[in-house]
Amino acid sequence: MSEQARRRPPKPYRKPKKDPVRMLAFEALRAVDERDAYANLVLPPLLRKAREAGDFDGRDAALATELVYGTLRRQGTYDAIIAACVDRPLREVDPPVLDVLALGAHQLLGTRIPTHAAVSASVELARVVLGDGRAKFVNAVLRKISRQDLDAWVERVAPPYDEDPEDHLAVVHSHPRWVVSALWDSLGGGRAGIEDLLEADNERPEVTLVARPGRSTTEELAAATETLPGRWSPYALRMAEGGEPGAIEAVKEGRAGVQDEGSQLVALALANAPLEGPDVRWLDGCAGPGGKAALLAALASERGAALLASEKQPHRARLVERALAGNPGPYQVIAADGTRPPWRPGSFDRVLVDVPCSGLGALRRRPEARWRRRPEDLDGFAPLQRGLLTEALRAVRVGGVVGYATCSPHLAETRVVVDDVLKRTGGAELIDARPLLPGVPALGEGPDVQLWPHLHGTDAMYLALLRRTA
């Protein structure tokens, strides 16, 4: 070291500045990674706390939300790009460092934030949460990433489609390879359809309201906030971007709610299915957290029918009670296991079982689920799904109708389950569900129905309707 360098005074230490937006986004990502939390449950209380502290305005909240969800949706693509810019396997990079890098990659490649601002803000975040040493590593990696745009990076890190179609789509559209394969099988082939679906999974879903019949109206909701009409359900309204459903009086009071239009259609189809004989006792056998049960209870009350809402988990049963509170007609909520039910066989006229599943149909809303699920998880759901449908068929009287629903398009959770139960139990037949979704296009050959985000703007809900014949 030269004499001049020795005499030069050291640079004064600068305390890193905390950026509340990026700090909140980082905190949310760490909760998703460390606690297996879901972003849609973690983010709202964090945003509320920041607003109450005076740290956030509406634009800050919107940016934090975009950073969290955008990073999670494109995580697979960003991981492939980051891997090309580091000199070690990603598994050897500390998870908090990866979260900062992914946040930075999203700002560089997935937003209109200027390059210098994206890099400097990410490095500053790294100084706060990781320390100066690892902040230098973050700076070096993000500067490499900033040299190309997203299209150029994808062309570099994704294998050619002709050599490995599934891996190509997995990297380009940020889905695990096994999920790409399963969705492709469910769609029935064709490149355009699978690419449209995977891209739809990466778009922010609209917030859809339901006006519970007899308790609220779409006119009341439209007067309370800026909305667009629902596409398919007569009780649906789509909120304008940035709207706050919790600020609407009817939602506060439980007379309306937030519910995807696909879920509304499942409940409506069951309620409107042709029935032979009386129509006075309805069952929701997997009622938690209560959205479909609330709509069914409202529809039942208009016809003089009563709903029994059953949910195995007591804490979810309490959510159902909250959703049904104030329903004008008779209803009851119980905590019970639908595979070992307390009711007698043949007790009900209509039964809905929206069974626990992989959730692959709601990846728009829970993007982290695509990275959390494994193919072997389906083996764990299979006995439960079959058991619930078998008991639902026992619970309905002869001539009554059962609706089997999942928020997954995976064939192992939909048609395979229905076909298997029908073969083993007998005494039931499939009825065509398509006429019960009037106006909804592209419902396939039937008799069951599969909804799709890219075709219908809904979650990928599946519905099969079965009538008990003996």
Image (tube, grey):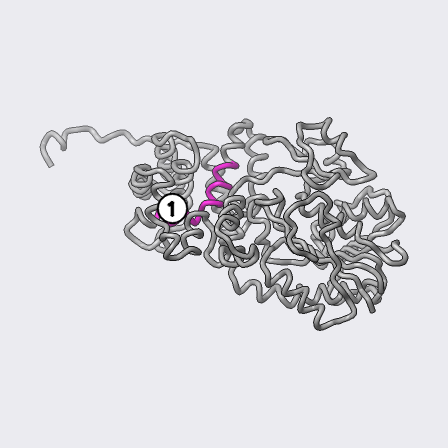
Closest to the observer, 58 or 426: 426
Q: Give the class, few, some or many, for how many residues have Cα within 10 Å of label 1's Cα (few <14, many ≥20).
A: some
Observer able to see residue 465: yes
Magenta span: helix, strand or loop, mainly? helix
Q: Which residue is depicted at the point 30% across and 53% down?
A: 88
Q: Which residue is depicted at the point 14% across and 31% down?
A: 5
Q: Which residue is depicted at the point 74% across and 71% down?
A: 425
In this figure, which residue is indicated by the disc labeled 1? 97
* Residue 450 located left or right of residue 174: right
Q: Which residue is depicted at the point 42% across and 45% down?
A: 99
Residue 117 in the image, given as x and y percentages of width and height = 37, 30
Residue 159 in the image, given as x and y percentages of width and height = 36, 53
- Range of residues picked out in magenta: 65-82
Q: Is residue 22 magenta?
A: no
Q: Is residue 72 magenta?
A: yes
**Relative height, residue 83 to residue 237 (above, below):** below
Name the element at disc 1: helix
Quick one: quadrant of the C terminus? bottom right
* Residue 216 located left or right of residue 19: right
Task: Count up the numbered dots.
Answer: 1
Rendering quarter of residue 229: top right
**Relative height, residue 1 to residue 347 (above, below):** above
**Relative height, residue 450 to residue 237 (above, below):** below
Q: Amino acid at mark 1?
A: Val
Residue farthest to the left? 3
* Residue 414 located left or right of residue 17: right
Quick one: quadrant of the N terminus? top left
